[in-house]
Amino acid sequence: SQKIEQNSEALNIQEGKTATLTCNYTNYSPAYLQWYRQDPGRGPVFLLLIRENEKEKRKERLKVTFDTTLKQSLFHITASQPADSATYLCALSPFSGGYNKLIFGAGTRLAVHP
Amino acid sequence: EAQVTQNPRYLITVTGKKLTVTCSQNMNHEYMSWYRQDPGLGLRQIYYSMNVEVTDKGDVPEGYKVSRKEKRNFPLILESPSPNQTSLYFCASSPRTSGTYNEQFFGPGTRLTVL
């Protein structure tokens, strides 16, 4: 069956360290992957998009990698801050779904401690 | 301000009482979608619309209806709500540009409880 998996356990790290979140998928051939941030009681907010022919994408302190051989995307936050504490969702777009179709993972909660 | 709005934000209702959750966007986006979010399951797509009068089922459409009479509005209708539709609902919109993958803009969510 098709699955997108993110660590269900919360990730706790110290301020200033790099947070690394994992998104694994099976039985999909995604055209691209997106990462979203979701704060409690709020809708997801778009962070980054990476296409299937791209290995890495950066935006300020954020970095996303996409390995179609391993079927995995890694999301890094460098120099993490308590304000980065949130749930992070990965979402992929299968080639068959059109340009707007997104399948979401359940998300990983990140807690950055001072 | 560019945004997606949903109403109501919170709703408690009883089994079988028809309800509508409204969604409106002011970004002139063609694509709109409804998701439900349940613990441990992530966001699951209920229905989506590629443009006015064009709607299609997502992954979990049972028990829901939608309509797209205007570009900006995409209401979600529960004709006969049941307790298993208790969930957090999100509306999202996105520009639909052929050949380009686009981010989705989400509304603030509607927390629905069906007793």
Image: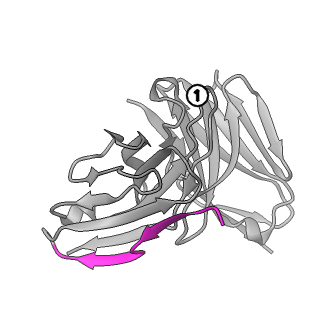
Is B50 or B79 nearer to us in this picture?
B50
- Looking at the picture, how far across and down is residue B80, in whole percent? 15, 62
- Looking at the picture, how far across and down is residue B9, in whole percent? 42, 75
Name the amino acid, label 1: Ser
Which residue is pictured at 66% across the width and 25% down the height?
A52
Splitting the image into 4 quarters, where does residue B22 fall?
A: bottom left
Q: In which quarter of the image is the N terminus of chain B?
A: bottom right
Q: Mark 1 points at which residue?
A: B98
Magenta stretch containing residue A83, yes or no?
Answer: no
Above or below — where is B114 with respect to B61? below
- Looking at the picture, how far across and down is residue A100, in whole percent? 52, 37
Which residue is pictured at 54% across the width and 58% down the height?
B106
Is residue B41 shown to the viewer in this render? no
Above or below — where is B98 with respect to A10? above
Which residue is pictured at 81% across the width and 61% down the height?
A80
Question: What is the magenta range?
Answer: B1-14
Judged from the image, the secondary structure of the residue bearing numbered disc 1 is loop
